[in-house]
Amino acid sequence: MRAGLSQTLAVAVLSVALAIALPHSFFEDWGWVAGPGAWLLCAALVARLLRLPLRGALIGAALAGLPSVLAVIVGVHWLGAALAVVLFALWCGRLAADPELPAEVV
């Protein structure tokens, strides 16, 4: 639960900051790089805050973000982000219970 709330807050704050700082055209041209980069940066922050293994959290963030790609393609970007947050939170809950999880996945 804490991972999901933390990721939501981090993504929201970073999204607002980027929206204020950068023109809309930036996101049209570079959103495909900026979005995943921001998502992973926020996941790294969450891992640090919750004392989760960084590698495991980043693997979970990448896997949780995959369904979001489909959501972006069909035009429901924020629905995909919400789904990714839920998946990331579930992954982090499992990771907290079993810190060796990334070794089993890779």
Image (cartoon, grey):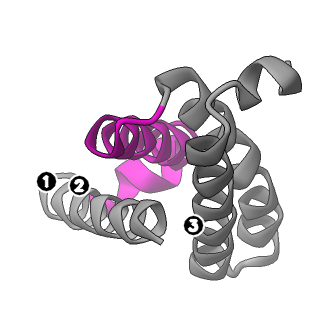
* Mark 2: amino acid: Leu
Horizontal relation, residue 103 to residue 14: left or right: right
Disc 1 from disc 3: Cα separation: 24 Å
On the image, numbered disc 3 is attached to which residue?
85
Report the amino acid beneath label 1.
Ala
Give yes or no for residue 33 being in the magenta stretch. yes
Asked where in the image residue 84 lies, by quadrant, the reply is bottom right
Please provide percent x and percent y for residue 27: 43, 53
Looking at the image, tell me whether mark 1 or mark 3 is earlier in sequence order: 1
**Viewer-proximal residue among 95 and 45:** 95
What amino acid is found at the position of numbered circle 3 in the picture? Answer: Val
In front of the other: 86 or 71: 86
Q: Secondary structure at mark 1?
A: helix
Q: Residue at x 40, y 38 (%)?
A: 47
Q: Is residue 26 above or below residue 20?
A: above
Indicate whether 25 appears above or below 75.
above
Give the class, few, some or many, for how many residues have Cα within 10 Å of label 3's Cα (few <14, many ≥20): many
Height in image: 54 above or below 22? above
Residue span colored magenta: 23-52
Which of 26 and 77 lies nearest the eye of the viewer? 77
Residue 87: x and y, percent? 69, 63
Residue 106 belongs to magenta span: no
Evaluate if marks 1 and 2 touch, with contact meaning CB atoms under 8 Å apart: yes
> For residue 21, which numbered disc appears in the image?
1
Q: Label 2: which residue?
A: 18
Query: What residue is drawn where x is 39% and y is 35%?
Result: 44
